[in-house]
Every structure is written in C-alpha cells, then in structure tokens.
Amino acid sequence: MNKCAVYLRVSTDRQSTENQRPEVEQLAAARGFEVVKVYEETMSAAKSRPVYEQMLKDMKRGKFGGVLFIWAIDRFGRSMIGNLQDVLELDRIGVTVVSVRESWLDTGGPVRNLLVAVFSWAAECERTRLVDRTKAGLEAARRRGARIGRPRVRVDVDRALELRGQGRTLREVAERLEVGVGTLHRALAARAP
C-alpha cells in the first residue's frame, strides 16, 4: 500500500475531529493508501497552527508519501491566499492534496487552481462573516447593558498602602491581596494625587 498522511482540524476545543476522521480514512483506504500519520488540530485557522506547520514541514521532507488527505478545504485553512499558496507549494514538491468534500481538488489542470481559489475565498468570506456576527452580538449585548470581558477586581488600596509602608514589594503586596501586580499598580496609580 502507498503511504499517506491526514490533516484534521476543528476550530474550538468544544468540537471534535471524530466526524471528519472516518470519512477521510475510508477515502484513503478506498484509494489504496495506508494512513501512517494523522495530524489533528484544535485551533482557529485565523491563528498560529503548530500542528499544521509541522505537517507542512513533514510533507516537504517526504516523510509520509506524496498524498495528504483532508476532510474539506475550509478545514485546511480559511485564507484564500494561504490555502492557494500551501496547496500550490505542496503541488510543487510532489504532494497531492485529496479532499473528501472537494473531489476536484486532486485533479490536474488550470480549472483546479481556479476552484482552489474560489473555495478558499468562500471560506475566507465565511470567516469574515463570523467575525462580523460576533462583533454585532457583542455590541447588542453592550446596548442591553451586559458587561463584556473579565469581571473587575476590587483592590483594597488602603491595605495595599499600609503593606507598602511596611516595606513590602509590589509583588508581595499583590500576592497578599490576591490580585495581579498590574491590577495593583493601576489601583495605586489611580489613588495617587
């Protein structure tokens, strides 16, 4: 059997790659490939992805044959430019990307490059819409009076000044009052004349 690798990704730790894995492994087996490495990542495509970076390095080194199976192009990444660059870079080094959801991805010719660009663009647009919806939801919550972010920490400034007067460092005072050093510093600065 030919060897291959699999890359699976979900955006949050409340999700699981278990719905992607069976279909990807089934497609690999149907095409006569043995999956020798599965890269699983729980990370937004908009952030740094160490597993993805390691997978790209390993594929460039030829560690797992010339085929990488994915579940869908939007699980590969959400940036049109990034997806296109990575797929074309893998093409250049002889790695074929095969997708369960996009059967056209492992075909040749100029239409493939166009389709990679179009579907990556669609994924990038969905990411932008998600960010916009999140911002709109936060703004609506603020208008209703909801507090967004971490709760405010109250600092006993009088006690902090007393401890400082005893010669204790900011760090010691912060530990004693069970607040962060930055929080304590801001509270003391706000009290200063």
Image: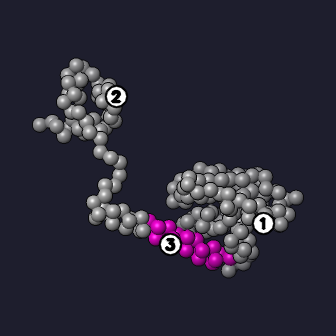
Q: Which residue is mark 2?
A: 175
| Residue at the image position 11 percent from the left and 37 percent from the top | 193
The quarter of the displayed image where residue 94 is located: bottom right
In the rendered image, which residue does mark 1 sit on? 27
Magenta residues, start to end: 112-131
Which mark, residue 134? none
Q: Nearer the viewer, residue 118 or 181?
A: 181
Dot placed on the residue nearer the N-terminal end, 1 or 2: 1
The kind of secondary structure element at disc 2 is helix
Compare residues 146 and 92 and report the one nearer the observer: 146
- Which quadrant of the rendered structure holds the N terminus? bottom right
Q: Earlier in the sequence, mark 3 or mark 1?
A: 1
Mark nearer the N terminus (2 vs 3): 3
Q: Going 82% across and 62% down the picture, which residue do you hit?
A: 29
Residue type, label 1: Leu
Find residue 144 and report its image quarter: bottom left
**What type of secondary structure mainly makes up the magenta span?**
helix
| Residue underneath mark 3 | 125
